[in-house]
Image (cartoon, rainbow, N blue to C red):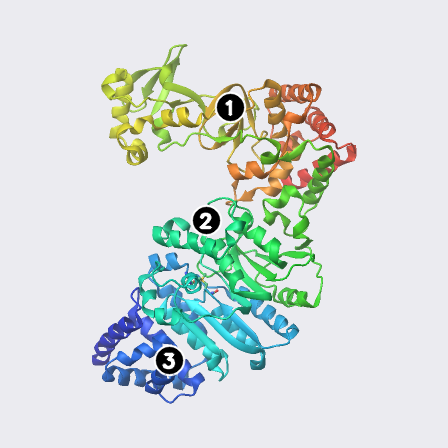
Amino acid sequence: MFKEIKNKELIKRLLAILKVRDVIDSAAALEIIVTSLAAILKSTNMPDISTLIKLTNFAPLKSLASLPQKDIFVLEELVTHKQETLALEDIFESQIKVARLIAPANRKRLAAYYTKPIGLRLMALLALEYAKRYERPLILSDPFLGSGLTLSEAIKELPPSHINKIWGIEPHPLSALVAYSAVAHALKGEYQKAKIIVGDAFKMVYQTPTSQSLLSYTESYTELSKEMVPKANVILTNPPFTRWEILDKDYRVFLTKFVQKLGYDKYVKRRQQNLQLISLFLMDYLLEEDGLLVSVLPVSTFYTLYGEAAKALLKDKYWIQAMVDFFEPSFSIDSGFKELVLIANKRKTDFETAFLTIDSYDLNLLEELSNIFKGARLTNSRLNWVNISKVPYPWHMNWLTLFGQNPLRELITKIFAQAAKRGVVATWSDAFNEKRIVRGIEMYGPEFFLIPNKYWRIVAENAEEILIKNNDTEMELHIDREFITPALRKPELYVDCIIPLVKHYFFSIPPKNESELPPDIAEYIRWGKLHSTAKPAVRAFGRYWYSHVNRQINVKKPFGRIFLPDKIDPSFSKRGVFACYTQEPLTASKNFYISTFNDDLKDKALALWFNSSLFIAYFIVASRKISERWTRFLEEDYLRMPVINVNLLDKHALQELANNLDKMAERKLEPLVFQLWEDFRLEMDKTLFEIIGIEDSTILRELYSLLKNVLCC
Ligand SMILES: C[S@@+](CC[C@H](N)C(=O)[O-])C[C@H]1O[C@@H](n2cnc3c(N)ncnc32)[C@H](O)[C@@H]1O
């Protein structure tokens, strides 16, 4: 008991000196510190902590000098005891455990989700193969070190003679201490080769001590941050994927400047920033020519707009040897992010990239993959070889489509390559000068702003007004049509008709005082105020909260005749249409993207394109699954995907497409798989194929049978 109390005091002082302020279990933190010190003493061959404090070059250990002597004694006792039983697994366990000790908010902010054993194994094998090829001892680094797992696991594989230096940067002092102990231990007596810095990697490179740091305590070790880190031959890492919005504003400003200072802004087309992208820039900056980069990255890097900059950098300077996807969602412990491992060699070649999916049992496959340096070319049904500088344009926007064997993807590639010769199919942004696509209306409370809703139904309509009734109170209100506008509500409501049956209205109330509005509108506003349904709008817009739809209508004018869903079930098991078409321009909720050319024939031709088997097949391959059921396309995706350029078609072609759309629009459309080979679809697809330049009639049959396979499973 006495010992426990004494330890409590010791823990407090020890954590304060090490500047560890955010652990959720101090006793567990002490255990980790003791294990780390025991491992460090063992690997450095130093007799005791006092000697270690004198001789070490690792800042947190130096700081232990300010511990009272009595604490050093207790610590010494604990460490000596631990040394007697210390096993390799204790060090590995500390490396895993330490992340879970960090208070959740800080853990999230640091993205302290360390790499899983399968990723570590892959990195270690690759480092070993690379080392064999390289003639001089290597400098290995992880600028986002965590508890040092990537480096320590790789060092264990490497003969000491292959290592020149190991360095890593980590802002969390406790993780950095664990990393130091694991790396020193793995270096088998050559601990002087390790340089571990507690700090912020971006600041280290930028070298401005006045700029904002990621966490306040990193400031305390700036004396070390002035020291330059040498460029590395091998970087093994898993950078922080912290969401941009949760970083401090000043830190975001600093990072933006950082990108400019290092000259990477030339890759960034849009202002949109992202921490993993900036981390990739940093890694590139720190990597020697011909160096090896193995990094876990979120898959979103390879399909989002901000990811275009990452892809541009990689295409510009690297041979991407492989992209490795994992059947499990994540390569990082406790992380929900869908991730992959990028393996890249910093030299420009025309060699192909292996796009491979692995599962946890694939250790043999990993070994084979590491032979990639010897020019080995694996074959496997889960592997696809691609020359990334020649990716066909329909797949540019989403490299995840390139994984594994996929006959449907190959056929679509062939179709688009043929269509390119006639030149009437291009990406949306290349085809149309103006954007011509607008997202529907943000709702901030659909149960208030849309009618009918959970609380109100429409009981009568005429040319001037609608009559609505409250489901609980049966109160009736007359709503003048001036204050409502018909709108498509959500894609699930319009699955079997090209022309949707629109039964919803948006309330579009001008920003006037309630006394200036008709009494029934004012009454509806009063009802909304009393109910939680309008809360999101009240919170977001204040005084004239009820007018935000009206404002959006006036400002962004979200009207059109073609309605593209933002999220659907890609199995099409309950869906016979993709895009809806309306005779008159209408609006929709934010669940749709709206487009219009204000030209009857062009709008119909475009609506047909989005319901063609070719486009739907493309959508199934190119869209990204956000859950088991849902697949999403954003505006940026629509702008980068292939589309028929209706501006280049002559009147006759447009008329033919429009006729086919009219025929489809007359029918109730069954789920897509049942439409394949039906006359109306066959005729429509044939017409489209002729117009875009696909003459071989067997191609459509092949498309149908591949689509059928996909839709049936
Ligand atoms: C996803 S973890 C990976 C850790 C380790 N590389 C691994 O793979 O197990 C990201 C690490 O980066 C660290 N980190 C976050 N921001 C950093 C920064 N600005 N500079 C250096 N490291 C940072 C976090 O504390 C965390 O340990």
Q: Amino acid at mark 3?
A: Leu
Residue pointed to by mark 3:
37
Q: Which mark is residue 560?
A: 1
Determine crowd level at label 2: few under 14, some 14-19, many 20+ residues with C-alpha closer than 10 A: some
Q: Earlier in the sequence, mark 1 or mark 3?
A: 3
Marks 1 and 3: which is nearer the front?
1
Determine crowd level at label 3: few under 14, some 14-19, many 20+ residues with C-alpha closer than 10 A: many
Q: Quadrant of the N terminus?
A: bottom left
The residue positioned 46% from the left and 80% from the top of the image is 185
Q: Secondary structure at mark 3?
A: helix
Residue 91 in view of the camera = no
Q: Amino acid at mark 1?
A: Gly
Residue pointed to by mark 2:
273
Decide: is 417 above or below 52.
Answer: above
Q: Earlier in the sequence, mark 3 or mark 2?
A: 3
Viewer-proximal residue, 209 or 580?
Answer: 209
